[in-house]
Image: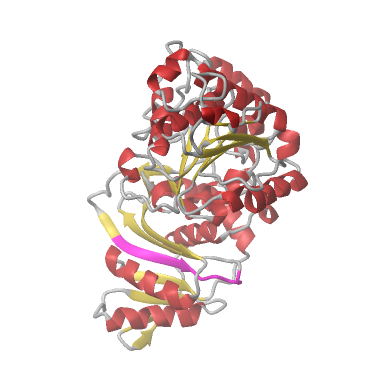
Amino acid sequence: MPEMEWTPFHRVYYRLLEAFAAGRVRRMMVSVPPQHGKSRGASVLLPAYLLGRDPELRIAVASYSFALAGRLGQEVQRLMSDERYRKIFPAAVLKGSGPRSAGERTARRTAQEFDCVGAAGGLKAVGRTGSLTGCRVDVLIADDLYKDALEAHSPLVRERVWEWYQAVARTRLHDGSRELVVCTRWHEDDLIGRLKRTERVVELRAWDQLVGLPPDVWVSVSFEALKASPPTELDPRAVGEPLWPGRHSAAWLAQRRAADPAMFEALFQGNPVAREGLLYEGFSTYVALPAALRHRANYTDTADTGDDRLCSICYAAGVDGLFYVTDVVYSPEPMEETEVAVAAMLVRNGATVAHVESNNGGRGFGRAVERRLREGGNRLCVVRLFHQGGNKEARILTHAPTVERLVRFPADWRVRWPEFAADVCGFRRVFRANAHDDGPDALTGIVETELEPRGGRIRLGGFSRR
């Protein structure tokens, strides 16, 4: 296809699709802004390429409507019927596009479905309510399962999409199947959003992350129309640079952002949470800790209810007045498991004091962590237990500007602690809109503890002191 425009973005996008085609990635989700060639690559060129490599593959391409899925299927057929394609992939033959053979009699070829002549493979295109009964699916490609914002913002439609994906599409898969989800983001609870909450997902920042990747882990890549996140190996653009400047300039994108910031964040930035409603505007990062540090410490907020997460943060307090996060345990697991992880983290980070909220079982948790430290021979870390009596919402809202100004995260913190980062960066000012407040609560506790030292019970070496 000599007419292809190979921007840096397209080279990365097709390299990702190549890794998927070669089986180095088994499960991948890609968020791409509108009109950047997403469907052409994932739903037309990729299926044709896969069948050219292996005509035995059974591929399903799903979209929001039966008609659109059919058009994508027809484009695949047109490509595979081209003489140039047949010269490259002579084994992938469609009914009526090559020399007549006995296999043509049983091969199917309609707008929505076709077989490769003389092979078991082929493609079926379905809408999101379509049936796949009786079909083995080796490769599932889900391309934009929501038509527009009206559908994506409908809880009923989102639930139907999820049910179809789980009850129809995934039931046709097997151990060796591959899944690709490509979409323009509309809502935080769309298919990608729900998969990120329910399954293991790795945010891809560097190509070496693909080495030794477990088959059940999703690889997630999000391309911003205007670069806003730190540069990575996959996307080294400077902040503010457009993804496809020849098609969508920075000035044009700025106009779209000004017209509807919330929609722009979702559609073009892959971030379906309007920044105008977020508590934190953004955090500064660091590459290396400063040479001059006052101390290394920890703040732990134990889970209040069964839905909460334990959030334990190790940090280094610099003489510059900033607090550098060095490690995080963010987990919904029971205390029997998290106390082991927190104790190991305290030792690993050289913390000299651990501030543990004693509310709702926190006292027992703190004592268990202290016991594990002593059993491991560590007597350098002081476990400080205290009761947190302040109103959580008021504390977090009041200290939010101070947290943003004084807390620094490692440059790769979104990769190292993706769930923690998502809950902190997506935290909204309207508290009832948040699923979890444990991350912001612990960050607030750090600045409160460091700037407003409180009295508390210190347990060290088997005795207590004030």
Residue furthest top as drawn: 3
Q: Is residue 416 visible?
A: yes
Q: Quadrant of residue 377?
A: bottom left
- Kindly identify the residue that appears in the image at 65 percent across and 37 percent down: 145
Q: How is the image coloured?
A: secondary structure
Q: Position of residue 255 (x, y in %)?
A: 61, 19
Q: Position of residue 270 (x, y in %)?
A: 55, 35
Tell me: residue 50, above or below residue 192: above
Left or right: residue 185 versus residue 318 is: right
Q: Position of residue 179 (x, y in %)?
A: 51, 44
- Kindly identify the residue that appears in the image at 65 percent across and 41 percent down: 187
- Kindly identify the residue that appears in the image at 41 percent across and 24 percent down: 89
Between 99 and 348, the one lying in front of the other is 99
Left or right: residue 88 versus residue 278 is: left
- In the rendered image, the quadrant that contains the N terminus is top left
Tell me: residue 351, above or below residue 61: below
Please check the rendered image and state whether residue 463 is part of the magenta-colored stretch, yes or no: no
- In the rendered image, the quadrant that contains the C terminus is bottom left
The span picked out in magenta is 295-306
**Callout count:** 0
Q: Position of residue 242 (x, y in %)?
A: 48, 21
Q: Is residue 466 visible?
A: no
Between 426 and 101, the one lying in front of the other is 101
Please check the rendered image and state whether residue 301 is part of the magenta-colored stretch, yes or no: yes
Residue furthest bottom as drawn: 462
Q: Quadrant of residue 205?
A: top left
Between 98 and 383, the one lying in front of the other is 98
Between 45 and 260, the one lying in front of the other is 45
